[in-house]
Amino acid sequence: MTRRVFLVGFMGSGKSSFGRRLAAHTGWDFVDTDAEIEQRAGMSVSEIFSTRGEQFFRELEEEVIGEITVGTPTAATTAMKTTVFALGGGAVCRDGAMEHINASGTTFYLRMPPDRLVKRMSEHGRARRPKIAGMNDAQLLAYIQKTLPEREKFYKMANFVVECGGRTDAQILEQILEKL
Ligand code: S3P
């Protein structure tokens, strides 16, 4: 078993990009739960939503998270190897999920201000995310302002809240690394 590091947060907060950079910098493994779900389903997240519905996607998500969190890491296994997991933005937004994930590794909430989330998600970035596909900046900002408060109660249960506002990518990475 490996030590596990989980990145949680809203769509566009950089869970996958920081996760990948963290892994490249340290030599750790990197797993993106959305990519894992796509591989299992043999289709993209957008296709899963449109052909099977969000509920089916959430079931796959829960299954993947259940598998990657099996067992409690011990000091001995922790010394061996680390895997960084980027979790989909909605993956932890149900009762019990954060408690479960916190028990199986170290969790970080990448807390990115709404205006920066909007800037970080390009047209392509929005198109591949079914919940926000086709939104313009104003619509996306309104969606984030409505949804983020509902989701933050889960995200904030992470072991560490990484304040990303006003920080460069390098400073954000540094904040994560210094806690590990
Ligand atoms: C979702 C976030 C997405 C993906 C799916 C649903 C959400 O992941 O799992 O489109 O409900 O917030 P990212 O947070 O990696 O974009």
Image (cartoon, rainbow, N blue to C red):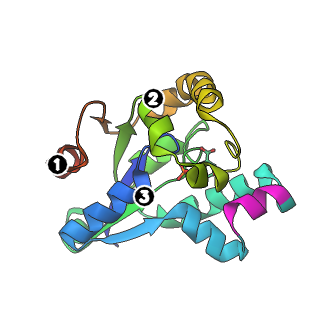
Q: In which quarter of the image is the N terminus?
A: bottom left
Using residue 96 as the reference point, say whether residue 176 is left or right of it: left
Q: What span is in magenta?
A: 44-50
User: Of label 2 and label 3, which has the lower sequence position?
Assistant: 3
The picture quadrant where one finds residue 159 is top left
Q: Name the residue type under label 2.
A: Asp
- Predominant SS along the magenta part: helix
In the rendered image, is residue 99 in sight? no
* Residue beneath disc 2: 115
Where residue 29 appears, as percent x and y from the top left, is 33, 73
The amino acid marked with disc number 1 is: Glu
Q: Is mark 3 within 8 Å of ligand 1?
A: yes
Residue at 50 percent of width and 26 percent of height:
153
Q: Residue at coordinates 34% horizontally, 44% vertically from top-left?
A: 108
Q: Is residue 94 above or below residue 78?
A: above
Secondary structure of the residue carrying numbered label 1? helix
